[in-house]
């Protein structure tokens, strides 16, 4: 697949092995994993961090293999989902950090272009969430008040 903002192709990478059941060497049961997800989410961890902690500390290779559902659905069932989607929050955080950098380094044109690309991704993602009904139709990304979203 080609890159979004560059004229290059993507790099080849390894793929996960096809599996539709948990590995036989795994010792944790489903209730334990759901309890850990709930505990980590209440501590304020993101889904990516929860996945890394489960993989590194508890040997859970893939939550979906073990539980049969994605972690997002489990968090939704527990009513612990964040107010704004994590991918949008990460992009807004990246854009605000780049804005702070550009205030100090006004002539950094490469970073200015990077900020334009990040903000176009934010607008595209907001358009998607409006279409899916996650955001109201009058919601708009404003760079000046984006820090409040974090």
Image (spheres, helix red, strand yellow):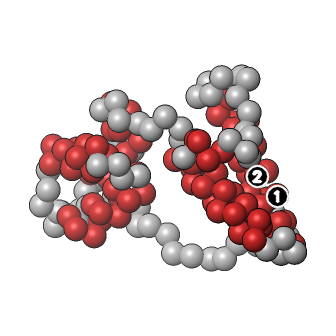
Q: Note whether 140 is above or below 42 in the view shown.
A: above
In the rendered structure, the answer to whether residue 149 lies left or right of residue 107 reads: left
The image quarter in which residue 60 lies: bottom left
In the rendered structure, the answer to whether residue 28 lies left or right of residue 23 reads: left
The image quarter in which residue 9 lies: bottom right
Residue indicated by mark 2: 119
In the rendered structure, the answer to whether residue 81 lies left or right of residue 90 reads: left
Residue 18 rendering spot, x and y as whole percentages: 41, 61
How many numbered badges does the structure rendering display?
A: 2
Query: Tag on residue 116?
Result: 1
Q: Residue at x 75, y 71 (%)?
A: 104
Q: Is residue 149 in view from this perspective?
A: yes
> Tags 1 and 2 in contact by the CB under 8 Å rule?
yes
> Cα distance, mark 1 to mark 2?
5 Å
Q: Secondary structure at mark 2?
A: helix
Q: Residue at x 64, y 51 (%)?
A: 92
Q: Residue at x 36, y 52 (%)?
A: 45
Which quarter of the image is occupied by the N terminus?
bottom right
Q: Residue at x 61, y 47 (%)?
A: 147
């Amino acid at each position: 697949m080609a890159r979004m903002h560059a004229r290059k192709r993507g790099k080849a990478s390894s793929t996960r092995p096809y599996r539709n059941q948990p590995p036989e060497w795994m010792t944790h049961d489903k209730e334990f994993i759901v309890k850990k997800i709930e505990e980590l989410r209440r501590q304020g961890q993101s889904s990516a961090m929860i996945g890394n902690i489960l993989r590194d500390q508890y040997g859970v290779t893939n939550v979906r293999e073990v539980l049969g559902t994605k972690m997002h659905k489990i968090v939704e069932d527990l009513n612990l989902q964040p107010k704004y989607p994590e991918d949008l929050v990460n992009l807004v955080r990246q854009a605000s950090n780049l804005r702070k950098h550009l205030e100090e380094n006004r002539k950094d044109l490469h970073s200015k272009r990077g900020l334009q690309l990040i903000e176009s991704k934010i607008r595209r993602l907001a358009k998607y969430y409006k279409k899916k009904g996650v955001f109201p139709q009058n919601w708009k990304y404003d760079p000046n008040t984006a820090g409040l979203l974090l």
